[in-house]
């Protein structure tokens, strides 16, 4: 493999495909699983694993020493490509495959919000206010909304990428060149 190749491309594609596969499985399993908090946590963990693999591969390409900047490129690339793949998949799913899934998402969010507010012992008046606001929200998927969701993911993934890159980097010993 070339010294200046970016393993983030490969791992981003693999990660995106794996996340789409997981999404298909949870979609088939039903909305309770698809919209569960732990499903999102599992998907994030999978993305992190692939991002770390990309960073470690780049570190190996560079002979075991890697700067923060050199680690950040493949790690962040992994997240960007994976997020782009999953965004396209979700757009197709919500827009064309199962447009009624938006209603299931909204219902699930209303129920989980109500449970959370009750758990924190919020006053019923506040719970009703929050649920009314949420009920008025338009959850339908369009190109602009999908793009904005993608940009939000990119921002959060950059922060995660920076943390991973700080962990992966390996500075040269005194007097050694990177």
Image: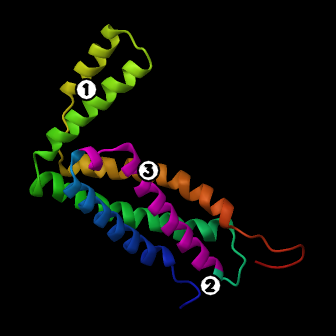
Q: Residues within 10 Å of mark 3 (few under 14, many from 20)?
A: few
Residue 75 in view of the camera: yes
Percent from the top left, x then y, of residue 13? 37, 73
Q: Residue at x 32, y 16 (%)?
A: 127
Q: Is residue 88 visible?
A: no
* Callout 2–callout 3 Cβ contact below 8 Å: no
Viewer-side residue, 128 vs 75: 128
Q: Quick check: 85 above or below 113?
A: below
**Proximity of marks 3 and 1: CB atoms separated by less than 8 Å:** no
Earlier along the polypeptide chain: callout 1 or callout 2?
2
Q: Nearer the viewer, mark 3 or mark 1?
A: 3
Q: Which mark is residue 61?
A: 2
Provide the secondary structure element on which disc 3 rests.
Answer: helix
Magenta-highlighted residues: 32-59
Above or below — where is 80 with respect to 98? below
Residue 134: which disc?
A: 1
Mark toward the start of the polypeptide (2 vs 3): 3
User: Mark 3 = which residue?
Assistant: 41
Residue closer to the observer: 57 or 116: 116
Q: Residues under labels 2 and 3: Cα distance?
A: 30 Å
Q: Nearer the viewer, residue 58 or 18?
A: 18
Residue furthest out toward the front: 29
Secondary structure mostly seen in magenta is: helix
**Left/right of residue 85 with respect to residue 80 in the rendered view:** left
Task: Give the distance between the C-alpha atoms of the residues marked 3 and 1, in whole angstroms.
Answer: 23 Å
* Closer mark to the observer between disc 2 and disc 3: 3
Residue 47 placement (x, y as % from top left): 45, 62
Q: Quadrant of residue 22?
A: bottom left
Mark 3 and mark 1 lie on one chain; the one further toward the N terminus is 3
Residue at 51 percent across and 78 percent down: it is 6
Residue at screen point 47% across, 67% down: 77
Quadrant location of the C terminus in the rendered image:
bottom right
């Amino acid at each position: 493999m070339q010294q200046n190749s970016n393993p983030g491309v490969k791992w981003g594609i693999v990660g995106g495909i794996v996340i789409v596969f997981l999404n298909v499985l949870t979609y088939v399993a039903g909305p309770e699983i698809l919209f569960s908090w732990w499903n999102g946590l599992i998907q994030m963990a999978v993305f992190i694993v692939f991002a770390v693999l990309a960073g470690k591969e780049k570190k190996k390409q560079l002979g075991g020493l890697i700067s923060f900047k050199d680690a950040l490129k493949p790690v962040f690339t992994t997240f960007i490509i994976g997020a782009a793949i999953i965004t396209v998949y979700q757009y197709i799913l919500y827009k064309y495959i199962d447009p009624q899934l938006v209603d299931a998402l909204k219902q699930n969010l209303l129920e989980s919000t109500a449970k959370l507010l009750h758990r924190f012992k919020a006053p019923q008046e506040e719970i009703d206010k929050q649920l009314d606001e949420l009920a008025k929200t338009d959850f339908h998927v369009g190109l602009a909304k999908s793009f904005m969701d993608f940009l939000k993911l990119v921002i959060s993934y950059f922060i995660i990428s920076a943390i991973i890159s700080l962990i992966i980097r390996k500075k040269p010993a005194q007097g050694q060149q990177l």
